[in-house]
Every structure is written in structure tokens, then in C-alpha cells.
Image: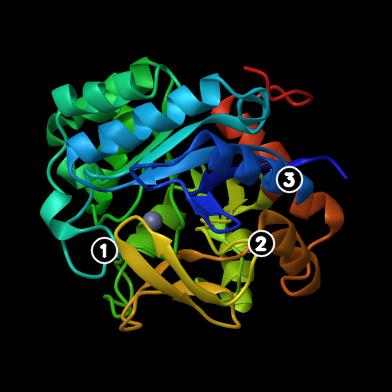
Amino acid sequence: MTPMVDLQVNGFAGIDFNQDALTAEQLHRACELISAHGVEAILATIITEKIEVMAHRLENLARLRESDPQARRIIAGIHIEGPFLSPEPGYRGAHPVEAIHSANVDEMQRLLDATRGLTRVVTLAPESDPQYRVTKMLAGQKIVVSGGHCNPSLDQLRAGIDAGLQMFTHLGNGCPMQMSRHDNIIQRVLSQADKLWLCFIADGVHVPFFTLRNYLKTAGIDRCIVVSDAMAAAGLGPGRYNLSRWEVTVDQDLAAWAPDRSHLVGSAITLRQSFTNLTTQVGLSDASALRLTSTNPRLAIGLNPSSTNG
Ligand SMILES: [Zn+2]
């Protein structure tokens, strides 16, 4: 089977990438196990915190990767999710509201510098990016700008796309349980599916399998990507784990819940388990499941089809 590529990985096998003191041994071990689970490349994902905390974590991660050949092979780049997201409840999900704010070029540049050129995807809220300046800046550097944890109007979404928005992060999540039945973020994004890569989490909890089937049919397999959004529990199973400042409960369903179960905070699924769900629960062929977990994520971030060294 062609090795898979996972564009959103917050941690793996008990190791949280979103910690201040991530060690070389931890990163090496996580990369070894990610590889053992059939994944050839990932984007290590750092989520919203105060800018200086994010910059420190990104810098540490990039530095550790640099000195470890295994980490260099597996970590094709970094996905920065936040802090320029919607502060509204439901949309912000697990991202701490006091660290969320409007996008600005200087802070974005500080985060990019911290990753030493490794940033491949940035998730932001188009409506929190005044004049779409950060979107344009990132697109100009060939960094994929992905909408997520956001609620732009259709006009704002279209303007974001015109400015360089190319992707949407975990569609069907990062939004409230209850929304307007017709004009909501999911329908708006689906209406633009010919212009965006749509990413989904295929654990059956973030999006029920029948709903995922509907989304895939509407957007078409060629526009869709499956990510794990895995946190430290991935590869281990139910229990209590950390994701950044959160202690997370992982149930039998392998979804990671906030302590009060008010919202999901990542998954504990691996991409290989996601692939199995796609073929056994969603009813896709192996070829289609491979498009979602290998071909399309490579295309989206411009990763060589046969090699991750880039
Ligand atoms: Zn998210």
C-alpha cells in the first residue's frame, strides 16, 4: 500500500507535540511509531497559544527535527492551527479564547520564522484576517492557507479564496452543534468545493460516517483529504492524555473530549484506522481511500509523490 500522508498531527503514542519541553527522544519515538503505522509523512501541528508560547514550541520542534534524520523523513512540515481563529463559542472549539485574535502580518512572520521555513499549512479564520493580508502573504510564499474554526459569510469566503485560501480544515467540526439550517459554514464551504481542498476526520464521531459519505459525494473524492487530527492518544487507545493545556479523555470511540464533554479536542485515531473506516464504514474502494489519505494530501502541499524529502 502506498504510504499515507497526514496533514494534521498534534501528537502520537503518548507524546504531545504541543508542549514546551518536547525532547529529542520523544520526537524520535513518535516519528518511529508514526512510520510503523504506515504513514510516510506528516505535518506536525501546533495549536493556539499566546504567540510567544507558539513561537517557542515551533522553534523547538523545528530544531529537534533538524538534528534527527528519522524526524526529517517523517515530518514533511508544520501545520500552524491558530491563533487567528473565530473567538465565538462553538467555532473556536478547544482553542483558548484569550489567545485567539485577529490576524496580523508581523505575528504571522514571527511564527513562520520560528519554523525555519517548515510551515506548509496555516489554519485561520478568513473573517479574522483584515483585508486578507495574512492570507495573501502566505499564498505569496506558497504556504497553503486553510479556513477553519471560522464562520465567514459566503462573500467573505469567496474573497478569502480570491486572496489565496486553498483548503478547509476538518469540515463539519470547528463549528457549533446548532446552526442555521441552510446558510451555515458547512454549506458555504461545500458550495466552493471546486476551489478548495476539504479535510475531514474519519473516526465516525467528528463526522458520522453517513454524513461523511454525503460530503464526499457532494465535493467529489478529488477535492477531499482525510486527516487524523491525532493527539497524543493516537496509537494507544482510551485513557487520559494531554493536548497543549488540556487534559483530554479518550473513550472507546477514540474521540478526544474536553473534560466536560462540551467539545472534541482532536482524535485518537491513526490514519491507518481512518483508511480502514473509509473502506469498511464509508464504503469506498481502496483506490478512493488512497486518494484521500495519500494522493490528495501530497498534491495539496506539493509533496513529491514518491518521496517526502522536500
Ligand atoms: Zn481544529
State how far apart marks 1 and 2 are (Cα): 28 Å
Q: Nearer the viewer, mark 1 or mark 3?
A: 1
Whether residue 102 can be seen here: yes
Q: Nearer the viewer, mark 1 or mark 2?
A: 2
Q: Which mark is residue 291?
A: 3
Which colouring convention does the figure follow?
rainbow
Spot occupied by residue 222 in the image (x, y as percentages of width and height): 66, 44
Decide: few, some or many residues near mark 3? Use Cα within 10 Å; few <14, some 14-19, many ≥20: many
Decide: few, some or many residues near mark 2? Use Cα within 10 Å; few <14, some 14-19, many ≥20: many
Mark 2 residue type? Gly
Mark 1 residue type? Tyr
Quadrant including the C terminus: top right
The residue that label 1 is drawn on is 91
The residue that label 2 is drawn on is 235
Spot occupied by residue 36 in the image (x, y as percentages of width and height): 78, 47
Mark 3 residue type? Arg
144, 110: nearer the viewer: 110
* Element type where label 1 sits in the image: loop
- Snapshot quadrant of residue 235: bottom right
Q: Are marks 1 and 3 in contact (CB under 8 Å)?
A: no
* Element type where label 2 sits in the image: loop
Q: Residue at x 41, y 63 (%)?
A: 242
* Element type where label 3 sits in the image: helix
Q: Earlier in the sequence, mark 2 or mark 3?
A: 2
State how far apart marks 1 and 3 are (Cα): 28 Å
284, 303: nearer the viewer: 303
Spot occupied by residue 218 in the image (x, y as percentages of width and height): 58, 60
Decide: few, some or many residues near mark 1? Use Cα within 10 Å; few <14, some 14-19, many ≥20: many
Q: Earlier in the sequence, mark 1 or mark 2?
A: 1
Q: Residue at x 70, y 48 (%)?
A: 33
